[in-house]
Image (cartoon, rainbow, N blue to C red):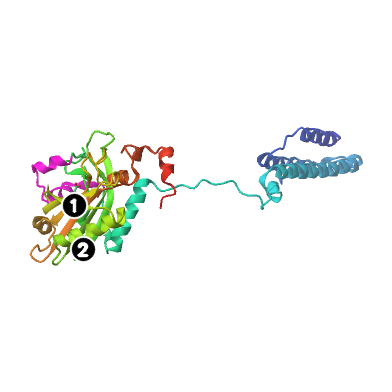
Amino acid sequence: MNSLIEKIQLLKSEMEKEKVTDPPALEAFRIKYLGTKGLLKQLMGEMKNVAPENKKEAGVLLNEVKQFTEQYYQKAQDSISLNSGSALHSTLDVTLPGDPLPSGGRHPISIVQNKIINIFQRLGFAVAEGPEIEDDWHNFSALNLPEDHPARDMQDTFFISRNPDWMLRTHTSSVQIREMEKGRLPLRIICPGRVFRNETISARAHCFFNQVEGLYIAEQVSFADLKQTLYFFVKEMFGERVQIRFRPSYFPFTEPSAEMDISCLICGGKGCNVCKKTGWVEILGCGMVHPKVLENCGIDSRKYTGFAFGMGIERLTMLLYEVKDLRLFSENDLRFLQQFSSAL
Ligand code: PHE
């Protein structure tokens, strides 16, 4: 029964042809030759059939090939781990300076939004948020803009085709309605968030932008409180030298209503392209909350009064950093964004 001896020799030459260069191949090799059901075990099982006169020779050969296989396995294992990270690890010089990791920065809109939030938080305003998809009540009707009110045209609205009652909010005043409906008074909140209007995209207009609106409702809140609050905001935001003025205006949800201008930051009021030679730029709308809006939210308008204001963050950011094109804010061009990474 010398066929076992032949088999052993065959096994050895086959093994020498194996290419074991990575961990999966190493494991496959182990299972094939050294595993409990591997070829070596099989050959050992055949020992009992070997004729007594050949037993010694076969036993010696089998032992040899077993040792050979184990050494072969060990060598393959060593050379694989030498080429992998674990070996590299031991030769890593931890005192070398690391590769610099470029750190990200905040988007200019976030920088300015955070600045605005921070100023109002110091005055005791809390941040409130709401959904970007709104229903007619919160975006329009509760704000004293009933159906067919001409002022709805001021806000070119994106409607949601699945439900004629739904739309993308055109302002964050909708969040103010949601907060007033909760009935917790007095109320002092600011509502930052993205809003949507169906406008043709250009350097000065976009179909979405960001707002911060504010609302203060308590007993005996007056227009003087509104002015004082906004005065403080402007000084903190743009510095002591900036002038403000109020112009009468119209919003369905406030009465009286006003728009607030600041003296042009670019030319200091002398007149330039940004302020269209007037020396003033409009930055927000505001007014005393219309009694109807309070009543719509279940608030007693004989007991409570309040003021509200709303501003566009893009507009302020353009003024602060002299950005000439609104589209830059949503194009995510790193050459533009990187200029703000160190600010705030
Ligand atoms: N909601 C108004 C707008 O988006 C802004 C505003 C808010 C005006 C509060 C007055 C009072 O145009």
Q: Position of residue 8 (x, y in %)?
A: 82, 37
Give the structural element (helix, strand or loop) at label 2: strand
Over which residues does the magenta segment extend? 132-155
Q: Is mark 2 within 8 Å of ligand 1?
A: no
Give the structural element (helix, strand or loop) at label 1: strand
Residue 44 appears in the figure? no
Dot 2: within a 10 Å radius of its alpha carbon, few (fewer than 14), some, or many (20 or more) residues? Answer: some
Q: Which mark is residue 187?
A: 2
Which residue occupies the foreground of this view, 44 or 97?
97
Q: Is mark 1 within 8 Å of ligand 1?
A: no
Residue of label 1 = 245
Q: Is 256 on the left-hand or right-hand side of 90?
A: left
Q: Position of residue 339 (x, y in %)?
A: 42, 43
Residue at image position (9%, 62%) is 301
Q: Position of residue 89 (x, y in %)?
A: 68, 49
Residue at image position (18%, 59%) is 226
Q: Is 71 on the left-hand or right-hand side of 224?
A: right
Q: Is residue 150 magenta?
A: yes
* Alpha carbon distance from label 1 to label 2: 26 Å
Which residue occupies the foreground of this view, 320 or 84?
320
Q: Is 158 on the left-hand or right-hand side of 37?
A: left
What amino acid is labelled 2 in the image?
Leu
Q: Which mark is residue 206?
A: none
